[in-house]
Amino acid sequence: MNKENPFIVIVDDDDIITDSISTYLELTTDYRIASFNHPVEALDALKDQSIDVIISDFMMPDMNGLDFLSKIKRLSPSTVMILLTGYADKENAIRAINELELFQYVEKPWDNEELSLIIKNGLDKKNLVLELTSKIEELQETHKQIADQKDEITHLYELLQKEYEAEKENVENVIVALAKAIEAKDKYTEGHTDRVSHIAVKIGERLKLSKEQLKVLKIGGIVHDIGKIGVPEHILNKPDKLDLLEFEIIKTHPIIGENICKPLKSLSFVLTTVRQHHEKLNGSGYPDALTSDAINIESRIIAVADIFDAVSSERPYRGKMTPKQVREVLYREKEAGSLDPLVIDTLFSLIDEGEINLL
Ligand SMILES: [Fe+2]
Ligand SMILES: [Fe+2]
C-alpha cells in the first residue's frame, strides 16, 4: 500500500476544468494533485511516477482519452482510471470500460462531491486489490514453503525408514545368529530351533492363524531357547537326569530369554512366547505356572513343536525314541491336560499326511 498521500492526476484540454477539479480537491482533501492540458505533455511528465487515480477528458486535440489512458495503463497498470465525457461520448466510454478496465466514467457537467466520492471509491478499490494481491503472494509463498517442507519431511522419513529397516534386519540377524550359537553349546539340540520354527508354522498355518501370528511362530521358534545362554554347558549336556537344583537353573531360561529380547523393539512381538513356551495348560509348567487361556496360542503351538522335536531326537540322558514312542509321549501329555489337545491333534494330522516327518 502507498504510504504517501494518494497522487491524483487530471488531464483535460480545458484549463477551466482542470483548475476547477484541482482546486476543489486541494481544498477538500489531502491528495497530491497534478493537472495537464495536453495528454502528450502529461505522458512525458508522468513516465516514472506512480499514479493512484487519473481523470482524463475524452475529446482532446492531440490524443483522445482512450489512447491516452491505454498508454497510462501500460506505464502504470494499477492506476484507477476515470473518464470525463460529454453526453455524446457515452459509447466510447463504455468501450473504455471493457477494453481498459476503466473504473468509471463521469458525464459533464459533473458534480464535485460525486467526483470526489468516485475518486475515494477508486482508491479504496485499488488498495483492496493491492492488499489482496499481497495476501495471495503471501499465501503462495507459504504454500511453496509447506510444499518444500513436505518434500523434505518425506525425504527424511524415507531415510529413517531405510535406516530403521536396515537396523531391524541387523538386530534380527544378530538374534538369530545368537540363537544358533546357543544351539552349538548344546550338542544334542543341533537344528532344534529351525525345526521348532518350521513345525510351529506348519501347525499355525493349518489352524489358519494370521500372518502376524505366523511370524511369531517363525521367529519365536528360533529364539525361544535363547535364554539357555545363561545355563551352564555342563547342565545342558549332562548325560544323566538333572537334579533338582540343575532343573531350577534350566527353568530360568524363559525369563533370561525374555530379558535378552526385551530391549529390542523389533522382537517385542515374541516376548510373551519366549516366556511362555514351557507353560502347561494344567498349570504344571514354568516360569509362571499359568493355566489354559492365560497361555497364548502361539506359546501353546511352540510348546508342542518343542516337545515333539525334543522327544523325537536323541538327548544326553536317553537314546532316540521310535515314532510310536513319540506319539505315545505326546498322547500322554494330551491326556494329562498339559498340552493343547487341538494343537496335538493338528500335529498328528500333519504327520499322518506326511507334512511333518518324524526324525
Ligand atoms: Fe525351552
Ligand atoms: Fe526348546
Image (spheres, rainbow, N blue to C red):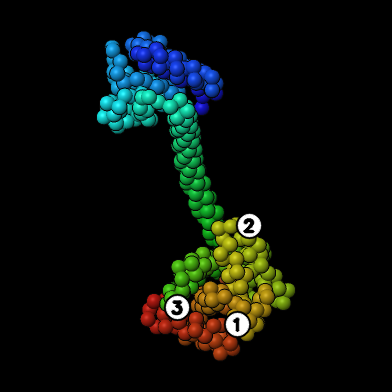
Marks 3 and 1, the one that precedes in the sequence: 3
Give me the residue at 48% from left, 67% from top: 212
In this figure, which residue is indicated by the disc labeled 3? 207
Q: Are marks 2 and 1 in contact (CB under 8 Å)?
A: no
Q: Nearer the viewer, residue 67 or 93?
A: 93
In this figure, which residue is indicated by the disc labeled 2? 263
Quadrant of the picture in which ligand 2 is shown:
bottom right
Q: Nearer the viewer, residue 141 or 262?
A: 141
Q: Is residue 137 above or below residue 253?
A: above
Give the Cα distance between marks 3 and 1.
18 Å
Label 2 amino acid? Answer: Pro
Give me the residue at 58% from left, 87% from top: 337
Q: Position of residue 306 (x, y in %)?
A: 54, 74
Q: Quadrant of residue 55?
A: top left
Residue at far bottom of view = 335
Give the Cα distance between marks 2 and 1.
28 Å
